[in-house]
Amino acid sequence: MSRANIQNNIRRLRFDRDEMTQQELADAVGVSRQTIVAIEKGNYSPSLELAFRIAMEFNSPLEEVFSYEATEK
Amino acid sequence: MLYHEKQSYLNIFSGIIITAVFALIVYNKQMAGLIDVTGDYRVWGYLLLIFVGVSVVARIIIQIIFHIINVIATREEDVPKKDERDKMIELKALRNAYYSLSGVLLTMIILLALGVPINAVFIAFILGGLITEIVENSSQIYYYRRSS
Protein backbone atom coordinates (compact mmCIF):
# COMPACT_ATOMS: atom_id res chain seq x y z
CA MET A 1 0.00 0.00 0.00
CA SER A 2 2.76 2.42 -0.81
CA ARG A 3 1.91 6.06 -1.28
CA ALA A 4 1.43 6.48 -4.99
CA ASN A 5 1.80 9.43 -7.31
CA ILE A 6 -1.88 9.33 -8.05
CA GLN A 7 -3.83 12.36 -6.90
CA ASN A 8 -7.57 12.56 -6.78
CA ASN A 9 -10.39 15.05 -6.52
CA ILE A 10 -12.87 12.77 -4.82
CA ARG A 11 -13.28 15.04 -1.79
CA ARG A 12 -14.19 18.02 -4.01
CA LEU A 13 -16.45 15.93 -6.25
CA ARG A 14 -18.30 14.61 -3.20
CA PHE A 15 -18.72 18.17 -1.95
CA ASP A 16 -20.12 19.25 -5.34
CA ARG A 17 -22.52 16.34 -5.15
CA ASP A 18 -24.47 17.84 -2.21
CA GLU A 19 -21.89 16.70 0.36
CA MET A 20 -22.16 13.06 -0.61
CA THR A 21 -20.83 10.98 2.27
CA GLN A 22 -17.95 8.54 1.96
CA GLN A 23 -20.34 5.75 2.89
CA GLU A 24 -22.74 6.71 0.09
CA LEU A 25 -19.93 6.70 -2.44
CA ALA A 26 -18.62 3.41 -1.05
CA ASP A 27 -22.06 1.80 -1.39
CA ALA A 28 -22.46 3.17 -4.91
CA VAL A 29 -19.17 1.72 -6.16
CA GLY A 30 -19.25 -1.47 -4.07
CA VAL A 31 -16.37 -1.05 -1.65
CA SER A 32 -16.01 -0.33 2.06
CA ARG A 33 -15.93 3.22 3.46
CA GLN A 34 -12.36 2.57 4.65
CA THR A 35 -11.29 1.94 1.06
CA ILE A 36 -12.75 5.31 -0.01
CA VAL A 37 -10.94 6.96 2.94
CA ALA A 38 -7.66 5.32 1.87
CA ILE A 39 -8.13 6.40 -1.77
CA GLU A 40 -8.99 9.99 -0.79
CA LYS A 41 -5.89 10.21 1.39
CA GLY A 42 -3.77 8.81 -1.42
CA ASN A 43 -2.79 5.78 0.64
CA TYR A 44 -4.30 3.30 -1.78
CA SER A 45 -4.38 3.33 -5.58
CA PRO A 46 -7.61 1.77 -6.81
CA SER A 47 -7.79 -0.74 -9.62
CA LEU A 48 -8.64 0.63 -13.05
CA GLU A 49 -12.12 -0.85 -12.77
CA LEU A 50 -12.82 0.84 -9.43
CA ALA A 51 -11.37 4.11 -10.72
CA PHE A 52 -13.79 3.99 -13.66
CA ARG A 53 -16.70 3.13 -11.36
CA ILE A 54 -15.92 6.16 -9.17
CA ALA A 55 -15.61 8.42 -12.23
CA MET A 56 -18.91 7.11 -13.61
CA GLU A 57 -20.57 7.77 -10.26
CA PHE A 58 -19.58 11.43 -10.56
CA ASN A 59 -20.41 11.53 -14.29
CA SER A 60 -16.90 12.78 -14.88
CA PRO A 61 -14.06 11.62 -17.11
CA LEU A 62 -11.42 9.56 -15.36
CA GLU A 63 -8.76 12.27 -15.66
CA GLU A 64 -10.97 14.72 -13.80
CA VAL A 65 -11.16 12.37 -10.83
CA PHE A 66 -7.63 10.99 -10.87
CA SER A 67 -4.38 12.44 -12.08
CA TYR A 68 -0.90 10.97 -12.26
CA GLU A 69 2.29 12.79 -11.43
CA ALA A 70 5.37 11.13 -12.82
CA THR A 71 8.47 11.15 -10.64
CA GLU A 72 11.90 11.84 -12.04
CA LYS A 73 14.12 8.78 -12.29
CA MET B 1 -11.08 -0.82 14.48
CA LEU B 2 -12.10 -2.65 11.32
CA TYR B 3 -13.86 -6.01 11.46
CA HIS B 4 -11.03 -7.68 9.49
CA GLU B 5 -8.44 -6.11 11.79
CA LYS B 6 -10.23 -7.47 14.85
CA GLN B 7 -10.35 -10.87 13.16
CA SER B 8 -6.56 -10.77 12.67
CA TYR B 9 -6.03 -10.04 16.37
CA LEU B 10 -8.40 -12.88 17.20
CA ASN B 11 -6.52 -15.28 14.90
CA ILE B 12 -3.20 -14.45 16.61
CA PHE B 13 -4.72 -14.81 20.06
CA SER B 14 -6.57 -18.06 19.31
CA GLY B 15 -3.50 -19.52 17.53
CA ILE B 16 -1.34 -18.93 20.60
CA ILE B 17 -3.98 -20.30 23.00
CA ILE B 18 -4.75 -23.43 20.95
CA THR B 19 -1.05 -24.23 20.43
CA ALA B 20 -0.28 -23.64 24.12
CA VAL B 21 -3.14 -25.89 25.28
CA PHE B 22 -2.12 -28.59 22.79
CA ALA B 23 1.53 -28.39 23.94
CA LEU B 24 0.48 -28.63 27.57
CA ILE B 25 -1.70 -31.69 26.94
CA VAL B 26 1.07 -33.45 24.97
CA TYR B 27 3.63 -32.57 27.65
CA ASN B 28 1.42 -33.94 30.43
CA LYS B 29 0.76 -37.16 28.47
CA GLN B 30 4.48 -37.58 27.81
CA MET B 31 5.28 -37.04 31.49
CA ALA B 32 2.58 -39.51 32.52
CA GLY B 33 4.07 -42.08 30.12
CA LEU B 34 0.90 -42.35 28.03
CA ILE B 35 2.74 -41.48 24.80
CA ASP B 36 6.36 -41.50 23.66
CA VAL B 37 7.19 -38.60 21.37
CA THR B 38 10.92 -39.24 21.46
CA GLY B 39 11.01 -42.51 19.59
CA ASP B 40 7.87 -43.31 17.61
CA TYR B 41 7.39 -41.09 14.54
CA ARG B 42 3.84 -42.34 14.09
CA VAL B 43 2.92 -40.65 17.37
CA TRP B 44 3.82 -37.30 15.82
CA GLY B 45 1.69 -38.00 12.76
CA TYR B 46 -1.19 -38.97 15.02
CA LEU B 47 -0.70 -35.89 17.25
CA LEU B 48 -0.46 -33.49 14.31
CA LEU B 49 -3.64 -34.90 12.74
CA ILE B 50 -5.49 -34.40 16.03
CA PHE B 51 -3.98 -30.91 16.36
CA VAL B 52 -5.18 -29.89 12.88
CA GLY B 53 -8.69 -31.27 13.50
CA VAL B 54 -9.09 -29.76 16.97
CA SER B 55 -7.58 -26.48 15.79
CA VAL B 56 -10.10 -26.16 12.92
CA VAL B 57 -13.10 -26.93 15.17
CA ALA B 58 -11.84 -24.60 17.94
CA ARG B 59 -11.33 -21.77 15.45
CA ILE B 60 -14.84 -22.16 14.03
CA ILE B 61 -16.28 -21.98 17.56
CA ILE B 62 -14.10 -18.95 18.43
CA GLN B 63 -15.17 -17.18 15.20
CA ILE B 64 -18.85 -17.78 15.98
CA ILE B 65 -18.43 -16.43 19.53
CA PHE B 66 -16.47 -13.43 18.17
CA HIS B 67 -19.20 -12.67 15.64
CA ILE B 68 -21.91 -12.82 18.30
CA ILE B 69 -19.94 -10.50 20.62
CA ASN B 70 -19.22 -8.16 17.70
CA VAL B 71 -22.92 -7.99 16.75
CA ILE B 72 -23.84 -7.18 20.38
CA ALA B 73 -21.09 -4.55 20.68
CA THR B 74 -21.44 -2.82 17.29
CA ARG B 75 -25.03 -3.73 16.28
CA GLU B 76 -23.71 -4.59 12.82
CA GLU B 77 -25.15 -7.96 11.91
CA ASP B 78 -23.53 -8.48 8.51
CA VAL B 79 -19.92 -9.51 8.12
CA PRO B 80 -18.35 -6.79 5.94
CA LYS B 81 -17.68 -8.03 2.41
CA LYS B 82 -14.07 -8.06 1.32
CA ASP B 83 -13.37 -5.52 -1.39
CA GLU B 84 -10.32 -5.20 -3.65
CA ARG B 85 -8.24 -3.46 -0.95
CA ASP B 86 -9.00 -6.23 1.55
CA LYS B 87 -8.03 -8.84 -1.03
CA MET B 88 -4.81 -6.97 -1.85
CA ILE B 89 -3.91 -6.82 1.86
CA GLU B 90 -4.76 -10.52 2.21
CA LEU B 91 -2.48 -11.38 -0.71
CA LYS B 92 0.44 -9.35 0.68
CA ALA B 93 0.00 -10.96 4.11
CA LEU B 94 -0.14 -14.39 2.47
CA ARG B 95 3.10 -13.64 0.63
CA ASN B 96 4.78 -12.80 3.95
CA ALA B 97 3.37 -16.00 5.46
CA TYR B 98 4.82 -17.93 2.53
CA TYR B 99 8.27 -16.43 3.19
CA SER B 100 7.91 -17.35 6.86
CA LEU B 101 6.89 -20.92 6.07
CA SER B 102 9.82 -21.25 3.67
CA GLY B 103 12.09 -20.15 6.52
CA VAL B 104 10.50 -22.71 8.85
CA LEU B 105 10.99 -25.55 6.33
CA LEU B 106 14.60 -24.50 5.72
CA THR B 107 15.19 -24.40 9.49
CA MET B 108 13.75 -27.92 9.78
CA ILE B 109 16.08 -29.20 7.08
CA ILE B 110 19.07 -27.55 8.79
CA LEU B 111 18.04 -29.04 12.15
CA LEU B 112 17.77 -32.50 10.58
CA ALA B 113 21.17 -32.07 8.92
CA LEU B 114 22.68 -31.07 12.27
CA GLY B 115 21.40 -34.28 13.80
CA VAL B 116 18.89 -32.65 16.13
CA PRO B 117 16.44 -35.27 17.54
CA ILE B 118 13.30 -35.72 15.47
CA ASN B 119 10.99 -34.69 18.32
CA ALA B 120 12.77 -31.33 18.55
CA VAL B 121 12.34 -30.89 14.78
CA PHE B 122 8.59 -31.55 15.08
CA ILE B 123 8.33 -29.07 17.96
CA ALA B 124 10.15 -26.53 15.78
CA PHE B 125 7.67 -27.30 12.99
CA ILE B 126 4.65 -26.62 15.24
CA LEU B 127 6.23 -23.42 16.59
CA GLY B 128 7.09 -22.41 13.03
CA GLY B 129 3.45 -22.87 12.05
CA LEU B 130 2.42 -20.60 14.89
CA ILE B 131 5.03 -17.99 13.92
CA THR B 132 3.80 -18.12 10.31
CA GLU B 133 0.26 -17.49 11.47
CA ILE B 134 1.41 -14.56 13.60
CA VAL B 135 3.37 -13.17 10.64
CA GLU B 136 0.33 -13.44 8.35
CA ASN B 137 -2.10 -11.77 10.75
CA SER B 138 0.38 -9.13 11.94
CA SER B 139 1.03 -8.27 8.30
CA GLN B 140 -2.68 -7.80 7.72
CA ILE B 141 -2.93 -5.49 10.74
CA TYR B 142 0.13 -3.56 9.55
CA TYR B 143 -1.18 -3.09 6.00
CA TYR B 144 -4.63 -2.06 7.25
CA ARG B 145 -3.07 0.52 9.57
CA ARG B 146 -0.72 1.81 6.89
CA SER B 147 -3.37 2.30 4.26
CA SER B 148 -6.09 3.84 6.38
Image (cartoon, coloured by chain):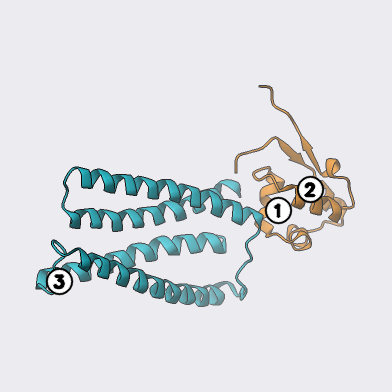
Chain colours: A orange, B cyan
Q: Is residue B28 above or below residue B108?
A: below
Q: In terms of secondary structure, where does tag 3 sit?
A: loop
The residue type indicated by label 3 comes to Ile
**Image position, residue B111 (x, y; %):** 22, 46
Classify the position of the N terminus of chain A by image quarter: top right
B54 to the left or right of B71: left
**Image position, residue B119 (x, y; %):** 19, 58
B13 to the left or right of A59: left
Gap between marks 3 and 2 measured at Cα: 64 Å
Asked if the residues shown at circle 2 and circle 1 are in contact, with their CB atoms under 8 angstroms apart, the answer is yes
Which residue matches tag 1? A36
**What chain letter is assigned to the residue under label 2?**
A
Given residues A64 and B105, the one toward you in this image is B105
Q: Residues within 10 Å of mark 2 (few under 14, many from 20)?
A: many
Which residue matches tag 3? B35
Asked if the residues shown at circle 3 and circle 2 are in contact, with their CB atoms under 8 angstroms apart, the answer is no
